Amino acid sequence: MGSLAIACVVGARPNFIKAAPLLAEFRRRPRFQPALIHTGQHFSPEMSGSFFSDLEIPPPDVNLEVGGGSHARQTAEVMLRLEPVLAKTRPDALVVVGDVNSTVAAALVAAKLGIRVAHVEAGLRSFDRTMPEEINRLVTDAISDYLFATEASGVRNLLAEGVPREKVFLVGNVMIDSLLRFREKARASDVLLRLCLEERNYAVATLHRPSNVDDPARLAQLVAMLAELSQRLPVVFPVHPRTRERMERTPECNGRLLLTPPMPYLDFLRLIADARIVLTDSGGIQEETTVLQVPCLTLRDNTERPVTVEQGTNRLVGTDAKRAFEAAIEALNAPPERKPAPELWDGRASERIADTLEQVL
Ligand code: UD1
């Protein structure tokens, strides 16, 4: 049995959390020769560097330093800069995770060079093509050779699109691998102390989806809603750079609304684990709160992660600020019942993925 050269591409914040346990697992196996390629889509210390140290990810072997820009520019820059790297190194497989622009760009380059593509977190569908991530998911899945699904809906969606059964593997959730691996370490974070918060007596909010933040008026309404909620209990709002760019002024507030920079992984994990409720438009946080059994209100009309609603503590409340506020008050008064974690969200998804790659490659 020969060695397996596996290149793993990451670009944006959620990618780092998903790739960390995969890289650790690949490194543990003598047959694997993993290489890490960072596209540089996210580049600031708070969106990238801190995740490498918190998640114990070794420095990337290559950094393409693409930075920000329009979707076309960002995707094209990743493709242009990645092609010579893959053409030279020709790994046995390229692993991509999630649904960001770096994911689809890297998958396209590898597929055209005849390098096999493994997509981790395949098959998720919001059925909303106004979301850039939905386009990225559809294209990446269509050209991948091995599709690793986190939940049963992912498998169903892929089969319904005509993907052959033998390409699809239900393996669980690598983001939850990280959560379980680092949960103990996160307990040591002093973030609650620094922000003067009491366990189970504050809310956490995150907003960064273009549909919620790109229109300054919409964003202002949502932030005003958080300010109002903060009269009931403190609300911590780590502000994503995209959101920060569009916030025109500091919200008026009679309560305790704490605006902070984006947080490192361990601080944020501690923060959501001990929150009373979470309000978010993120995909990953819907999954993390499901396992942490913290009530989550998702400020979107749809989710590509239905298991978090069916089996978890997640509720879709839409994007209307007034409705979201009412839902938050309801959740504070009557928290949803706690349920066990979804099937295979047990901290061993990376192991299953590595086992499968050993068999198929
Ligand atoms: C991207 C992903 C989204 C994911 C999110 C997590 C796509 C299409 N979107 O969205 O799916 O949920 O990451 O954060 O790939 N910026 C900085 N520093 C950084 C990174 C970004 O200041 O380290 C600023 C830049 O001005 C940039 C803007 O934030 O233009 C948006 O970044 P971008 O990578 O385009 O998209 P995200 O909104 O972060």
Image (cartoon, rainbow, N blue to C red):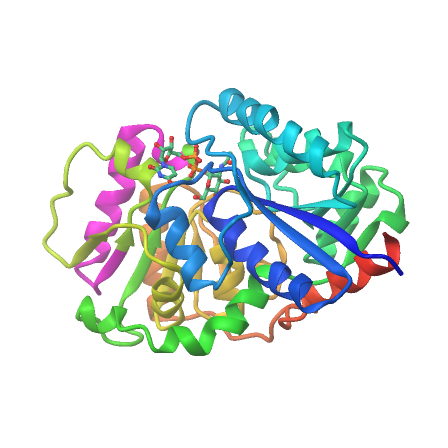
Residue 29 falls in image quadrant = bottom right
Most frequent secondary structure within the magenta stretch: helix
Q: Which residues are magenta?
A: 211-236
| Location of residue 344 in the rendering, given as x and y in whole percent from the top left corner | 69, 69
Q: Is residue 97 above or below residue 105?
A: below
Q: Is residue 125 or residue 352 the one in the foreground?
A: 352
- Residue 77 seen from this side: yes
Number of numbered discs? 0
Q: Is residue 133 or residue 342 the one in the foreground?
A: 133
Going by the image, does 147 lie left or right of 287?
right
- Residue 313 seen from this side: no
In the rendered image, which quarter contains the N terminus? bottom right
Q: Is residue 284 or residue 21 the one in the foreground?
A: 21
**Which quadrant of the picture is home to ligand 1?**
top left
Residue 333 falls in image quadrant = bottom left
Going by the image, does 228 lie left or right of 83?
left
| Location of residue 161 in the rendering, given as x and y in whole percent from the top left corner | 81, 37
Write the residue at 84% across / 41% down: 163
Going by the image, does 101 lie left or right of 172?
left
| Location of residue 349 in the rendering, given as x and y in whole percent from the top left corner | 68, 65
Q: Is residue 346 above or below residue 144?
A: below
Write the residue at 61% across / 64% down: 24
Q: Is residue 30 magenta?
A: no
Q: Is residue 113 above or below residue 240?
A: above
Q: Is residue 225 magenta?
A: yes
Going by the image, does 97 lie left or right of 326?
right
